[in-house]
Amino acid sequence: MQYCIETHGLSKHFGKVTAVDGLTIGVPTGTIAGFIGPNGSGKTTTIRLLLGLVRPDAGSATILGQPLANGLGYLPRVGALVEAPAFYPSLSARTNLDVLARLGGYPSSRVRAVLELVELSDRARDPVGGYSLGMKQRLGVAMALLPDPVLLILDEPANGLDPLGIIATRDLLRRLREQGKTIFVSSHLLGELEQVADWLIVLDRGKALYQGAARAFLDQHPGASLEERFLTLLKGAQR
């Protein structure tokens, strides 16, 4: 199996707190990989490590065949949304994206394309300061898609979305997978991941409790939902 992301013994400490603890995981190329775990389990720290936003204290990682230390070798092919996206509130969505496209050297056609992908074309000229939280999340995904990335890393992309927005995000992830992209997505909406994820990684206290095919995870307890299986796994690990 070819992996888009691999980590080996990856660790990160903040003072006496161990956020990521000897993490060894792999994300297969061309999949939607769901990254789940309770609050404080180390999901966002792991994502920040993969993006070079913080340095590991131990271990190693390879992203798109490049070592973690060689950010220039892989980051141009990665799109990411980490925590709350930041915008110029007085500018329109289109202008915000135009600025980023010019800075990144992306063609202006990408701005139109990503606005259509996240279904914001009809509000593209409105100031972002007037957007709802869900619309800002969708614009954040559009920002992540500007470079037409091979790997898309999304931290809670459905945060603040209404049911229709969640369905649209689910459909978007499937379309991106069909284009050959690998998507690594953290979420607390387990029911949504159950419907789109091919691969699952379950994290607790910085350690991987499970990684493998999503169907195999569910088949361990036939009839149980992803949320029920997830809670069972966490309870077992905390005994």
Image (tube, grey):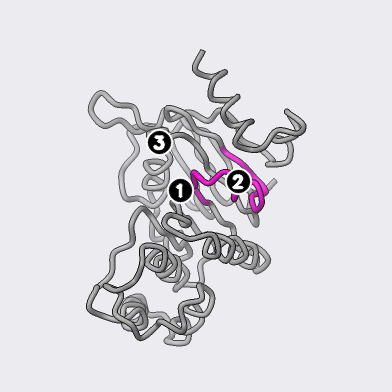
Magenta segment boundaries in residue numbering: 185-201
- Where residue 39 is drawn, which disc sits there? 3
Assess disc 1: are there few (<14), some (14-19) or many (≥20) residues with their C-alpha within 10 Å of its C-alpha. some
Q: Amino acid at mark 2?
A: Gly
Could you say which is closer to the camera, residue 44 or residue 236? Answer: 236
For image coordinates 50% across by 72% down, the residue present is: 118
Nearer the N terminus, badge 2 or badge 3? 3
169, above or below 237, in the image: below
Does residue 60 appear left or right of residue 32 in this picture? Answer: left
Residue located beneath label 1 in the image: 67
Does residue 222 appear left or right of residue 196 in this picture? Answer: right
For image coordinates 59% across by 57% down, the residue present is: 182
Magenta run includes residue 101: no
Could you say which is closer to the camera, residue 217 or residue 13? Answer: 217
Disc 2 from disc 1: Cα separation? 33 Å
Q: Nearer the viewer, mark 1 or mark 3?
A: 3
Q: Amino acid at mark 1?
A: Pro
Q: Nearer the viewer, mark 2 or mark 1?
A: 2
Q: Position of residue 225 (x, y in %)?
A: 67, 37
149, above or below 34, in the image: below
Disc 1 from disc 3: Cα separation? 28 Å
Residue located beneath label 2 in the image: 191
